[in-house]
Structure formats: structure tokens, C-alpha cells
Amino acid sequence: MKTSLPALPATLLVFCLAAPTLAQAPPPAAAPSPLPIRQVTLFTSGVSYIERGGAVTGDATVPLTFRTAQINDILKSLTLLDAHGQVQPVVYGARDPIGRTLEAFAVDVRQPQSRAELLNRLRGAEVTVTTARGTLTGQVVSVESKSVTTPTGTTTTDTLNLLGADGLQSVRLDDVAGIKLRDARLDRELREALRTLASGADDQRRSVTLRFSGTGRRDVRVGYIAEAPLWKISYRLLLGPKPYLQGWALVENTTDEDWNGVRLGLVSGRPISFIQDLYQPLYLPHRLAHAADARRRLAGGQFAGGQRARSGFRAESE
């Protein structure tokens, strides 16, 4: 004898979780984006396709903010559509290595250093030193360590040597209350280097500015790929006279915007996805042409009419 189970009414519901917050008071509402999110498609490979859309008027710029870790995906996949206008170049801040940027400053602050080490890097600079006994002005000659005898024994202290109008003078750094650089350019360089160093610690967000040109009011669309949490699914089976199957899809919204009126698509597939580092600037070393080779070729008549011989220069990597 065969028995059969009745068909189960099935329902799939979406349970959307917003990013959690620890703030006790609700944060102030952000200004609405002129290009709000219209469509989100989530895949089970950890990526999502996000489409924005809205109206712009005339020549328009639309700033968008992304996490720094998302910039490579944005640069790889960003697509802009303006059917009745023109898409202009997208502007974003380059990610030059902070160490390379700091190399351009006159004062090297790439590594943590003590006051004595910093003053040694400023050798030759004119400074004004303030102590409890007055002020001294002169050029930094050096900072040396000296042994000083105290009632409790012998200790080592740093001594700053200055060359001033009265000759070479020495002052213990323990007695120095303040040091001021008299060279305005050097003082400005030091402050800018420290600001650059501080800005490198705050690199969690990056701004990408979209630009459109045209006339009148028109609709534009923007699409891109971004990392997203995996969407999950769970089922509930209710047994009774009429069995009922219910499924819930769990979706986490970890973006900075609410998904209001968004068309959500859930794809149970694993498209091939990879990250290409397009955000990091790439530099190639220049090649060095030896002047001795050029002189020999000039003496041998291998250059005529300003043209280089076929053999060229002998070059080496720097």
C-alpha cells in the first residue's frame, strides 16, 4: 500500500540585517545621495553587483565614498551610463605609499625617533632653545651622549651642541623646555610631513567622484562589483493537518546606506571572482646610461646628425 504526502505550501522570505551599531543615540541622517542604490544582486561567491540610478541636471559631479578595501573592485568594474549626455573621467585620490610621499620632505619622519635623533637629522639648522636659565640661538652641530656623575652614581645624558654668535655652546637636553626652528621653510616641511604621516593612519574611506556633462535633466546609471557577505538560507517545516514549509533568506547590509526600495536578487551561483591591485601605483626604475660610453661613441663618429648609433648606450639598472 502506497501513501503520499500532500504538497507543502512553500514561502521564501527575506530577513535583512543592517550593520550593527554600538551608539546609544541614533546617528544623524546622512544627506540622500543623488544616485541612490536601486538594485543589489548577491552571489554565493562573496561578491555583489550594485546598481545606482537617479537624475542629474547639466554638468554634474556625484561623490561616492567607499571603503579602501573596495577600491580595487570599483576600479575594475565601475560602469557609467548617460544616455543623453557624456560620461567624464572619474576622479579618485591616488594611493601612493606613505613612505614614498614622506621621502619628498626635508625632514625624515618615517621612523619613530627621539628628540636627540630628530635634532641630529636637523644638523646645520638654526634653532632657538629655551631653558630655565634663558634662551640660546644657534646652528645645530650635533647631539652627543655624556656621562654625568650624580650622588646616586653615574648616568648618561644627551647634550645638544650649538654654534652661535658666542661660539660653540652645549646644553643638556634634560634642561631644554622648548626648541623652535628659525627656518620657516624647514618648520613648514616638518609640520607638513607630520600631517602626511597622520593622514596615512586614517585611510579607511576613499572618495570617488563621478562626473557627467550634458544639458537638461536626465537619468544616469552606475554599476559596480563590491565585496559582500554570503547570503544564507534557513527553512522551517510546520507539521499539522496541512504541512507548511517556510524559507528565510538572511542578507546582511554592511554598506553605509539603507536599502529602501531596492530590487534585491539572490543568486545561488559562484561566478569566478578575483581581485586585481589597480589602486596601488606602480613605478619602474629608470635605466642609467654611462657618460663614458657616450663620449667614446662620439669620438668614434658613431653619432651623426644627432642620431644615436644602433648599438645604443650601455645601460644598467639603478
Image (cartoon, helix red, strand yellow):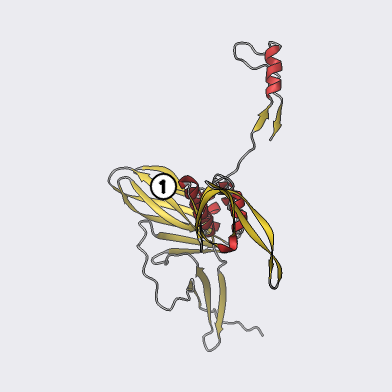
Left or right of 122 in this view: 80: left
Q: Residue at x 45, y 57 (%)?
A: 65
Give the percent coordinates (x, y) of residue 182: 47, 49
Res 182 seen here = yes
Q: Residue at x 71, y 25 (%)?
A: 314
Which quarter of the figure is the N terminus placed in?
bottom right
Give the percent coordinates (x, y) of residue 78: 49, 50
The number of numbered badges drawn on the structure is 1
Q: Residue at x 36, y 49 (%)?
A: 61
Q: Secondary structure at mark 1?
A: strand
Res 272 seen here = no
Residue that sits furthest to the left in the current view: 216
Q: Is 163 located above or below residue 13 in the figure? A: above
Task: Return the residue nearer the eye: 290 or 114.
Answer: 114
Pointer 1 residue: 81
Task: Return the residue nearer the eye: 110 or 243.
Answer: 110
Q: Is 255 located above or below residue 71 in the figure? A: below
Task: Return the residue nearer the eye: 255 or 243.
Answer: 255
Residue that sits furthest to the front in the current view: 166
Residue that sits furthest to the bottom in the current view: 240
Query: The disc labelled 1 sits on which kind of residue?
Result: Leu
Which quarter of the figure is the C terminus placed in?
top right
Task: Return the residue nearer the eye: 67 or 182.
Answer: 182
Give the percent coordinates (x, y) of residue 26: 39, 75
Left or right of 296 in this view: 72: left
Q: Residues within 10 Å of mark 1 (few under 14, many from 20)?
A: some
Q: Residue at x 61, y 51 (%)?
A: 120
Give the percent coordinates (x, y) of residue 32: 35, 62
Left or right of 1 in this view: 250: left
